[in-house]
Amino acid sequence: MKTSLSPRRLGATCTLLAGAALLALAGCTQETQNEIRRGIQNWTGTNGVLEIYAGDKVVKRFVKIDKISTAYGTDDTNPRPYRYGYGILDENLNGTADDGEKRVYFEISDYSTPYVFHESPR
C-alpha cells in the first residue's frame, strides 16, 4: 500500500520539523551552537584569509584556508594558547593564490601580533 502526503500536508510537516530544529538549537549552549556551525562550515568549506599585522601593515597573508583549529593537549585535553591550519602563503600579498605559492601549515599564538581571519570576498 502506497501512501503519500498532499503538498499542503508536506509543507506543514516541513515547517513543523524546521521549527522543532530551531527550538532544539535555541536550547543549546552558545558553545554547542558554535560547534554545530563549525561542523556545517567544515562540511561546506570556506575560503578563508588570514592576515597578520605589524602595526597597521599586513606583513603575512595566507589564502584559501578551510578552517583554523584550536590546539588541544594530548593528555589533558585542555585548549592550548594557539591556533593552527593550512593555507597558501600569499608571498606577494596580492590576495590571490598565484602559481608557485605553496600550501603550508601555520600556527598563530594567542600572544603574538594581531591577526584577522575572514572569508574571502572573491
Image (cartoon, rainbow, N blue to C red):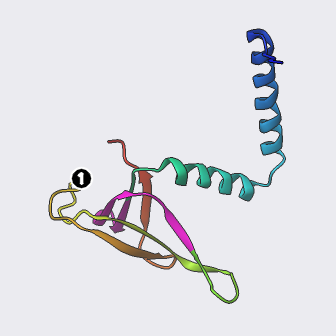
Mark 1: secondary structure? loop
What secondary structure is the stretch in magenta mostly built from? strand
Residue sitting at the far left: 99
**Left or right: residue 38 compared with residue 15:** left
Please say whether residue 73 is one of the residues in the magenta stretch: no
Residue 40 to residue 35: above or below: above
- Return the residue nearer the eye: 59 or 28: 28
Q: Which residues are magenta?
A: 50-70
Going by the numbered disc 1, the residue's amino acid type is: Thr
Q: Toward which corner of the image does residue 11 lie, by quadrant? A: top right
Please say whether residue 61 is one of the residues in the magenta stretch: yes
Residue 27 to residue 99: above or below: above
The residue singled out by tag 1 in the image is 96
**Left or right: residue 98 compared with residue 64:** left
Q: Quadrant of the C terminus?
A: top left
Q: Quadrant of the N terminus?
A: top right
- What residue appears at the point 24 percent right and 52 percent down from the top-left corner? 96
- What residue appears at the point 37 percent right and 74 percent down from the top-left corner? 105
**Left or right: residue 117 compared with residue 25:** left
- What residue appears at the point 63 percent right and 50 percent down from the top-left corner? 37
- Image location (x, y in percent) of residue 3: 81, 17
- Image location (x, y in percent) of residue 115: 42, 65
